[in-house]
């Protein structure tokens, strides 16, 4: 496998995206070059606790999917097989999503040639309702003031509207019955290596995305050519 460090050259994407916005820029490239018909990603509905799957066909609309949403439900594989089977689609997928997609490909429910998977390294997700209550109980912050959150180095970190950050150890939250979903706590797969590429901030400096290239055609520089 090969590795690169990347960040977006688009200032707006770099600012709005997670870890330098590399994932959003890659999705934009896939759309702009006509390599895919659309992108299935997550966007916030009412707030950061309410992420919903969103199908984007215009790269200008990708900004609403930038960032990470650890409270979002994930049924990416199910949505692709039910509604997007005949489309060429790029998806962002955590390790559990990737396992589901792989199984659906085996069962011929998803066309492998029609899907491009950008894996997202994952430390776990948090239920939306419990997430809001967790912020209220364990942080000196109003849940409505949270503009982004991330799980990093064993901590659940929130960023507030004023630019400040607060962090609490995941272990301490889970000792009190909060923190990650139960299945996430026992998951031992953090990097979705079955995806075409796997992206995250592990091992990268602030503002950069660490990308693990798992697709042989990508390594040879062929996969991203428009078809």
Image (tube, rainbow, N blue to C red):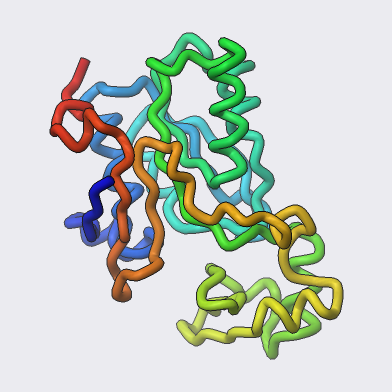
Residue furthest toward the right?
A: 177
Depicted 94 relative to depicted 35: above or below: below
Depicted 156 relative to depicted 167: above or below: above
* Frontmost residue, 67 versus 91: 91
Q: Quadrant of residue 160?
A: bottom right
The percent position of residue 74, horizontal first and vertical second, equals 64, 41
Query: Which quarter of the figure is the N terminus placed in?
Result: top left
* 169 displayed left or right of 202: right
The percent position of residue 179, horizontal first and vertical second, equals 74, 70
* Frontmost residue, 71 versus 198: 198
Residue in view at x 68 percent, y 45 percent? 73
Depicted 152 relative to depicted 199: above or below: below
Residue in view at x 65 percent, y 50 percent? 72
Q: Can see residue 204?
A: yes
Q: Can see residue 83?
A: no
* Frontmost residue, 210 versus 91: 210
Residue in view at x 60 percent, y 73 percent? 146
């Amino acid at each position: 496998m090969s590795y690169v460090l990347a960040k977006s050259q688009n200032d707006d994407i770099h600012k709005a995206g997670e870890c330098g916005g590399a994932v959003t820029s890659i999705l934009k490239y896939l759309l702009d070059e006509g390599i895919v018909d659309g992108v299935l990603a997550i966007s916030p509905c009412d707030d950061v606790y309410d992420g919903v799957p969103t199908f984007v066909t215009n790269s200008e609309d990708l900004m609403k999917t930038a960032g990470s949403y650890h409270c979002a439900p994930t049924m990416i594989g199910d949505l692709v097989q039910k509604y997007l089977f005949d489309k060429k689609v790029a998806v962002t997928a955590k390790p559990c999503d990737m396992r589901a997609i792989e199984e659906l490909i085996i069962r011929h429910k998803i066309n492998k040639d029609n899907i491009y998977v950008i894996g997202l390294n994952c430390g776990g997700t948090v239920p939306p309702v419990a997430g809001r209550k967790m912020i209220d109980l364990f942080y000196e912050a109003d849940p409505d003031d949270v503009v982004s959150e991330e799980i990093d180095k064993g901590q659940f970190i929130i960023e507030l509207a004023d630019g400040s950050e607060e962090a609490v150890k995941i272990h301490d939250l889970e000792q009190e019955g909060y923190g990650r979903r139960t299945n996430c706590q026992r998951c031992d797969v953090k990097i979705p290596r079955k995806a075409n590429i796997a992206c995250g901030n592990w091992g990268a400096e602030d503002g950069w995305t660490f990308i693990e290239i798992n697709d042989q055609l990508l390594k040879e520089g062929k996969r991203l050519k428009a078809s």
